[in-house]
Image (cartoon, helix red, strand yellow):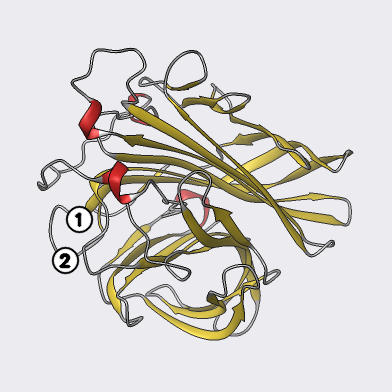
Amino acid sequence: MRRRSLLLATPALAAGGASWSLPPAQLKFPGDHGAHPAFRTEWWYVTGQARAGEREFGFQVTFFRSRIDGTQDMTSRFAAKQLLFAHAALTDVQGRKLWHDQRIAREGFDVASAARDDTRVRLRDWSLVRGPQHYLAHAVAADFALDLRCAPTQPVILQGAQGLSRKGPLPQQASYYYSQPQLAVAGAITLRGQRFEVTGKAWLDHEWSDEYLAPEAVGWDWIGMNLDDGSALTAFRLRKADGSPLWSGGSFRSPKGGGLYIFSPGEVDFSPQRHWTSPLSQAVYPVEWIVRTPADFYTVRAVIDNQELDSRNSTGAIYWEGLSDLLDSNGRHVGRGYLEMTGYAQRLRM
């Protein structure tokens, strides 16, 4: 739901506009791979695992777009009608360390752009571009760089009702949402001057909405997992302030793009098993979960505990997002992907 990294703006940026129910999804590609600037919030979210010999990494590249309602009628070229944010992160498994960076800019002036006809998002020297054969993800930070090709091996998953994904008890609390699991990764990761030629697997989420969070929601827990047999698992829940679930959902698709099962509210349960306290924010995150779904009871276990990201210089949030292992109900390792947890350091505002 990375969402998807899904961490947009301060209350002032997100305020304004009326609420209404989204119509049924009729997603059409390649157009819906592109930006939807009439909607308040949007993100393209790529996470994955990569390997170079015995060296293992997790990576994240996320671009966010936020529509500023109060500036839409302004005629000045300097009016900030759309803001673009970007996050990039690298988990060095052997080094037991997370590296991350962030960007923010208004759209325009050849600095930041989000194309409407396909995935072509750019913020200065960072970019995510969809081509005929693969997505190209490029981000250069102070201590690391990502230059990765992520090639689809399966069709997209239309989450929810054919791409319309409910996120709360009211119909307007919803998003248009699709996922591209089991992306084949190749390219290069550079860490503190050392370049690694890598291969691996990735997951892409693209989501856009006008009203994502119910007023009583403080954040969410989300997983996107590529299973070793080719299956794909999504599960999420939105939480109230007391930690109880407000809404849940997800999906499971069997190997090689086969049968798809969409989870109904109440069919997903997140039960924390082990916690870690951040020395930066003092937030207490569950870094091991049992996640009950109609597909199986899974254990989700962080590869390293400290994968907290401080994005107060861009989206304004502190959140946990990191590479995690997936074990089935028999304790067998069956996959790997990303766990995202928001609203633990402070209430998430969108």
Q: Which residue is denoted by mark 1 in the rendering?
A: 173
Residue at image coords 25%, 35%: 39
Q: Is residue 269 above or below residue 1?
A: below
| Quadrant in the rendering for residue 69 | top left
Q: Is residue 323 above or below residue 157?
A: below
Residue at image coords 47%, 56%: 317
Residue at image coords 62%, 36%: 150
How far across and down, in percent of the image, does residue 146 sit?
Answer: 71, 37
Between 227 and 91, the one lying in front of the other is: 91
CA gap, disc 1 to disc 2? 7 Å
Q: Is residue 80 left or right of residue 184?
A: left
Q: Which mark is residue 330?
A: none
> Is mark 1 in CB contact (under 8 Å) with mark 2?
yes
Q: Residues within 10 Å of mark 1 (few under 14, many from 20)?
A: many
Q: Is residue 131 left or right of residue 262?
A: right
Q: Amino acid at mark 1?
A: Gln
Q: Which residue is denoted by mark 2 in the rendering?
A: 169
How far across and down, in percent of the image, does residue 342 sit?
Answer: 45, 64
Q: Amino acid at mark 2?
A: Pro
Disc 1 secondary structure class = loop
How far across and down, in percent of the image, does residue 101 sit?
Answer: 64, 44
Between 29 and 303, the one lying in front of the other is: 303
Q: Is residue 140 above or below residue 199?
A: above
Q: Is residue 310 above or below residue 327?
A: above
Disc 2 secondary structure class = loop
